[in-house]
Amino acid sequence: MKHKFRHSLRFKLLTISLSLLVIPWAGYRFIQDMESILRQSQDDTLMSSAALLAGRLQPEAFPAVSVPVTGSRHPRPDVYVHLLSHQPQLDGYGEDWGRLRASGTDYRLQGGPGFLLLMGAWGDHYYLLLEVDDPVRNYFQGAEVVAAQGDHLLLAFTDQEQHLRQYLIAPRAPGRVAARAIGGAGDLLQPEQRIQGYWQEIAGGYSVELRIPKQLVGNKLALSQYDKESGLHQATSDMTQLNRMGNLVGRSVRLQTLLRQANIPDSRIWLTDINGHVLAGHGRLPMELTATTGSAGTPWFVHRLFSLILRQQVKDSPPVITNDSNMSADHLSAALAGGPSVSYHRPPDKDSLVVSALYPVNQGGDIKGILVVEQSTAAILSLQNQALQRLLTITLAVMSVIGLVLLGYASLLTRRIRQLVHQVEQAVTSDGRIIGQFARSDKPDELGELGRGFSRVLSRLAGYNEYLEQMASRLAHELRTPIAVVKTSLENALEVGDGSSAKYLDRALEGTSRLDQLVTQLTEATRLEQSLDQIAKYPVDLGQLLRVNLELLSSAYPEERFELVAENGHTWVVAAPELVTQALENLIRNALDFRVPDSVISIELAETPDHALVSVCNQGPMLPDGLDPFKSMVSVRREKSATPHLGLGLYLVRLIAQFHQGQASAANRIDGSGVCVTLGLAKQCADLTRHSGT
Amino acid sequence: MPRTIAIVEDEPAIRDNYAELFSRQGYQVQSYANRLEAEAGFGKGLPDLAILDIGLDDEFDGGFELCRALRAMSPTLPIIFLTARDGDLDTVSGLRLGADDYLTKAISLPHLTARVAALFRRVDALRESVQQADNDLITAGELQLDMDRLTATWQESPLELTVTELWLVHALVRHPGHVKSRNQLMEAASVYVDAATITSHIRRIRNKFRLLDTDFDAIEAVYGAGYRWND
């Protein structure tokens, strides 16, 4: 029997073994937990390193900076001095400032004048670059310079002695410009030769480059721009009051040195003032992750899997800081609020994160600056990747092995069970007689026990069946003696009697002879069953057998009419001819008992590819539904017939059919006129090993 | 002088019935219930014919023993085995005890009487040295049947057939080439047994022929339906 695979035990075992998938899932969760623990630990370590470092920084080393006031006209009073990488060409154009132009501070108003200011230091000079929005440029004309008559710039700074100096830059035309000092009373003095500048027109406005020697300048500086067209000023900070003027803020060597002493591996450290200007910076972040891209052995889908898992976390982090000079306010906001904080940033095109620990540097309750220590999580990430890889590989391997082992064992078990089923079925015929031995299994497990249980049950049943069968023959044997007693007594009585009771004695004798026939039939059935093993089968022409039998039948029953319906060719079967004849005789006797008088009994021979079928058909009453006439002792007779019967005749026919690996069946004729009983014989026999006897 | 028939049968009713039957027919009857009694009786004087039951009292093969003992005392004494079981016939013949006939207790009394009479006839015929010209002789090939004396010869050598076997062969030989069904053979030999018994009778007959002639194949089984004699 073939079951659908999804009903089989193996399928169920496989499904159950899918629960093993819990293992890699648990492992994955574990790795995730480990990762967050490690990250937490990294954050903590970083923070404590930052705290340590911040403690070592002397707040006095921080330059004075302007505290931002919300709502003030000058939100960014301090001017940051960049460290230039090369000397700019003083020509008024800012292209040679390079990348730095993007870091300029924006002093533009909505709908009003404004400019972009960039200040840098090179050698002994400060350089300033302004790019001003001014669509209508008004130059000064005439010998006298009155401030409001044209677009001009005002420069104010403190000198080394903290004195305020102011200068006017009022061009008459593009090109070289001079900075004229403004005296205490507001009068214009001679141009300061040491300050050089160039004024050039550019699209949308003009661009100014100034060069000021460092020794001129103290630590405060402010710049403003006047547009004649609109009449509006725009300044970096207050131009006259020293305490409100913006500071010059730049990288501090002292602080840089202090940072260099920090010993935080694989880190990048910034020190900014409260406005976000970078005062010192040190270190570089190693950006490559080890061991994720390097594992060439893992297949591509493993990488995809990893990126699926990991990118989730990286995706929602802000990008990493790339600006060397300035940090955005929101980046520092948490630290400015007073507490140390940790934030995460995403480096471009990388899977790792950058951890930023921000630590405010305090002096007496005031925040002087902010220490930013950055580290990459690359190390942790590569650890995690490695672990995940190992996990995946191992669990896949383990699961496949376990799955295969389970499947194999389940196959073994199902094979044993099927064998058991087959053996059990082979041992019993389709009508319940036990014909085979059942091999005892010697396996100690439950299946072996099951097999042994079957074997015990079958042998008990076989013993009981044997006992029952023998009972029949023993009974028959025992009956013969009393029957003989009765018969001989009756016969004697008939002989010596005076004839008056002859007819009673005759009837009695008739009764005993019927008894005798019954007993004979009983023993015949038993003997046939027992002798079946010894009877040999050999090739027999069934057609010829039927023809011979027909002859004999005609001479045995001269009043009856028989006809044979068969082709004249040869129909070879492997059979025991005396058994076939006996079965035929039983079938004929059965037909004779049932037939309508004077009707023909026909014997028909038919063939299928594997079997030959001999049918004896008679006209007469039909078989009732649900009756199996082949079961012994089943007898349905409408009238009493001459021969007594136990209903064994057809039972013998079935036995003989089974002996020939065929089947006996009974069916009503299609036209409803009677019954056909068919004996089927296999054409080939599997065990043609015995030689013919007799 | 009336002939003596010994009946050895452990079932008293059957024994008495047989005894009274034969008495009425004029035979002297000695009846014994078991082997020991019978041997004692035979020791005193042999009967002219013995009818033995196989299963005697508690001895399963008491009848066989008795037959051997009797045969030892007289090689020509007619012995008939009576048995309740059909299957015993095979066993009996296999033992080659030299009995003259094997019958079942199902046989009717008239038939039994006829058997006994036939056996006596044979004994008498064997004793007579004169061959009568009008013997009922049937010849078929190398077989010669004398139905008066109930003897048979094959290739001039005598065949040791029981009366039953003789009648079976006679039935076959009467119409050589014709197939006789087993029922027909049963009727002819006055034996009413099942088909398998006829088969074993025929087998025994063939074996007896083959003892004399290993090439004997004149009795042919035809599809298990019957037998015929081929010349």
Image (spheres, coloured by chain):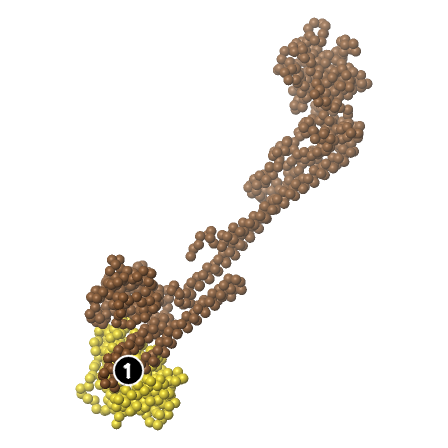
Chain colours: A brown, B yellow
Residue type pointed to by label 1: Leu
Residue A171 in the image, given as x and y percentages of width and height: 69, 10
Q: Report the chain holding disc 1.
A: A
Q: Is residue A21 visible?
A: yes
Tell which of A293 and A408 is nearer to you. A408
Q: Judge the density around disc 1: few (<14), some (14-19), many (≥20) Cα neighbours within 10 Å.
A: many
Residue A68 occupies quadrant: top right
Which type of secondary structure does the marked residue at label 1 adopt? helix
Q: How many marks?
A: 1
Q: Vertical placement of A138 versus A474: above or below?
A: above
* Rendered-image quadrant of the N terminus of chain A: bottom left
Is residue A176 among the parts visible in the rendering? no
Rendered position, A261 above or below B64: above
Q: Quadrant of the C terminus of chain A?
A: bottom left
Q: Which residue is labeled 1 in the image?
A: A490
- Residue B187: horizontal and vertical position, in percent? 25, 77
Of the pair A138 and A52, the residue shown nearer to us: A52
Q: Residue at x 79, y 18 (%)?
A: A159
Residue extending farthest front: A500
In x, y percent, where is residue A93?
66, 17
Q: What's the residue at 72%, 7% (across, down)? A: A145
